[in-house]
Image (cartoon, rainbow, N blue to C red):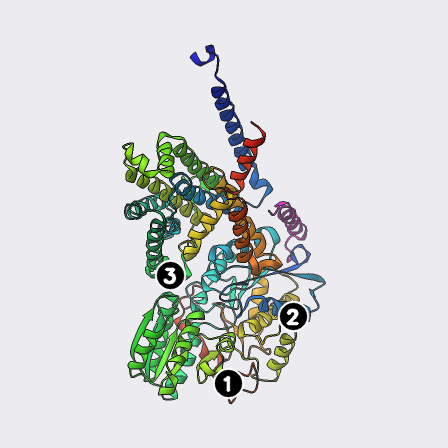
Amino acid sequence: MTFNKRSLVSTVAIAATVLATGTAQAEMSDDAVRIGYLADMSGTYRDLAGPGGLEALKMAVEDVGGEVKGVPIEVFSADDRNSADVGANTVRGWIDQQNVDLVAGMVASSVTIAVTKVLEEANGLGIVSGSAASSITNEHCTPNHIHWVYDTYPLAHGTAKAVVEQGGDKWFMLTADYAFGHALEGDVTRVVEESGGEVVGGVRHPFPTSDFSSYILQAQGSGADIVGLANAGSDTVNAIKTASQFGLTQTGQQLAGLLIFLNDVHAMGLEATQGLLLTTGWYWDMDEPSREWAERYFARVGRMPTMVQAGVYSSTLHYLNAVEAAGTDDAETVRARMAETPVEDFFARNGRIREDGRMVHDMYLAEVKSPEESTGEWDLYEIKSTIPAEEAYRPLGESQCDLVSQ
Amino acid sequence: MMATTHPLTPAMKRHRRARQRRGALYLALLGIGLVAPFVAYPVFLMKILCFALFACAFNLLLGYAGLLSFGHAAFLATGGYVTGFLLSSHPGLAPEVGILAGTLAGVALGLVFGALAIRRQGIYFAMVTLALAQMMFFFFIQAPFTGGEDGLHGVPRGQLFGLVDLSSNLAMYYFVFAVFVIGFAIVQRTVHSPFGQVLKAIRENEPRAVSLGYNVDAYKLVAFVISAGLAGLAGSTKTVVFQLASLTDAHWHMSGEVILMTLLGGVGTLFGPLVGAGLVVSLQTQLAQSPLGNWVGVILGAIFVICVLSFRSGIVGEIQTLIRKNFK
């Protein structure tokens, strides 16, 4: 049981500070910058963010010397167990009891949306690194959070467009039968049709599914060149494994995974995933600065970082730099400062934070290497092309976000 | 008045002493409940109370009627979604109306599930309830008003009776506490009524209850509906507190969790579910923020195994046995 005394004392302290400083900008609240890392630490999404993301966050804190403007940076973390109410409660507790200044991590979209509502109410600040849903900065946008790494818009647009351009214009959609799958399927269908391709068929599977054989057989019989996977996590992994067992890629069809992480490919192995096209926000082996950071990460964790883990580092560093520059950890001031500063580091190229909270940056189209091409355990992707930042994400003109002036 | 003039039999004295002790215990707990938000974090306490109410509802069925429902999450989620949907689509609607609607939805669903499930016994009963709850889960995933995977967010807490602003955690706490006390009182009254006696008789020996002329199915159905209604009440209250309703509440894990809470605390005891819910929620909260965060499931599982193997009547059940042994 946690006692409330501390928050009472700090509330009084804050009140006293505010009174004492009067109109002058409040500086560091309660003499520390507190970062809470919220993620799935034990479940389905553990490997794509999880403890590795926390380690990346700690690296960022260490890289600025563990303090900003002379006050220490405190880091704490919690497992949201992919449950919206656990996540929202944890963050509410952090705000009420621990004066958290930044909430980082955030993976499952349902948790993220719940948490951002809490942040909005309390006027806090959050940076979302793990979630996919583009609605986070669309209909669910708030002035209190930023979405950093990727979302479903570039996933659908990047992969689908590139595939059609490479000649794959007859699609079959394998879709997880719930909101996320439907949205992704809708986006992909639109992109395919706009680029001159057609969707010749599709099937929706329950979420989650372990036996994909009947769906893969339908896909094989559909006459499509491309089988698009509008699902995620274990569903994608199971579908790809089944497709590999049924020799789908050997018979001339190609898979297009719309949401695939490095750890998924690593877990399934190249034999099953070779030739898969995917869109990623970052890849550890894409250039020298990325490799350099990834090697440091590898030395600590023993695995290569996913784009989410790299994004946690990048976003935390950007936040801490903004705090340093602004001289305060006040959420609104820091958020404004972060948006003023372009994001340019090993992770983000041509990055900037838009008014809807979307951090747009270059995205990459990658192809999974074949076992013969790969030279090591983690040598998994080949970057085919770059999708420029301004084209990758949903244009502000199409935005339903209230913060965007139309 | 007559009783005081006659000498009391030892059995009557014992009974009266037991009643006084119970009254004192209730008063003490009520006092603790009233002071608690000044000592501990109110949101955390509200979470415990909501789950405790849910576990009490479940315990009424398992502990007193001997029916193991493996689908109670469906009622919790239905209450939550109905309340959440009503409150967020009709801004300004009083939260008590939303909660009432959620509870009624739980009752209605309980009537349907109950009518189907009580035709079977034992493991078949459990499987039927599980199957029906999974159907509800599928419905909640597909229905447009629930937000699917994303859930229903930003449910306003609103003004209680148009007077009390529930956005303050303290006001919200006392409201939840009152709801819990009412729910607990309903369970307590049900258990100690002649109706409850019949339920216990059915639990102990169903054929005998039938041979005595009781309409066993009707009794079971009423117990099922009361339990479902209280679970709906717990879900509705939870939605107002946390301002969201999500699929977590509808998932079968939730049905399992409430069994864990009830068994850990002590099935068939009035306070068992409260203790069990308090323990499970505290463990989850504390472990999630500790370095043992990855091990929440394993630790809860280990505790459950130890509990089932070594103290089967649960924490409160064991304490009761101890008291009975040592303080006659």
Q: Which image quadrant is residue B131 in?
A: bottom left
Q: State the mark number for residue B148.
A: 3
The magenta segment is: A1-26
User: Closer to the camera, B50 or B253?
Assistant: B253
Tag 1 secondary structure:
strand
Asked whether A3 falls inside the magenta stretch, the response is: yes
Q: State the mark number for residue A383.
A: 1
Chain for mark 3? B
N-terminal-most mark, 2 or 1: 2
Q: Residue at x 53, y 68 (%)?
A: A129
Q: Mainly helix, strand or loop, the magenta region?
A: helix
Q: What whole-number distance in Å separates the C-alpha atoms at marks 3 and 2?
A: 36 Å
Q: Residue at x 36, y 76 (%)?
A: A188
Residue type beneath disc 1: Ile
Residue A286 percent across, percent down from the top left: 56, 84
User: Closer to the camera, B318 or A9?
Assistant: B318
Q: Is residue B281 above or below residue A74?
A: above
Q: Which image quadrant is residue B220 in?
A: top left
Residue at which label 2 appears: A59
Q: Residue at x 38, y 35 (%)?
A: B200
Residue B151 percent across, percent down from the top left: 41, 58
Asked whether A305 falls inside the magenta stretch, the response is: no
Q: Residue at x 35, y 66 (%)?
A: A206
Residue A176 percent across, percent down from the top left: 37, 69
The answer to whether marks 3 and 2 sit on the same chain is no
Chain for mark 2? A
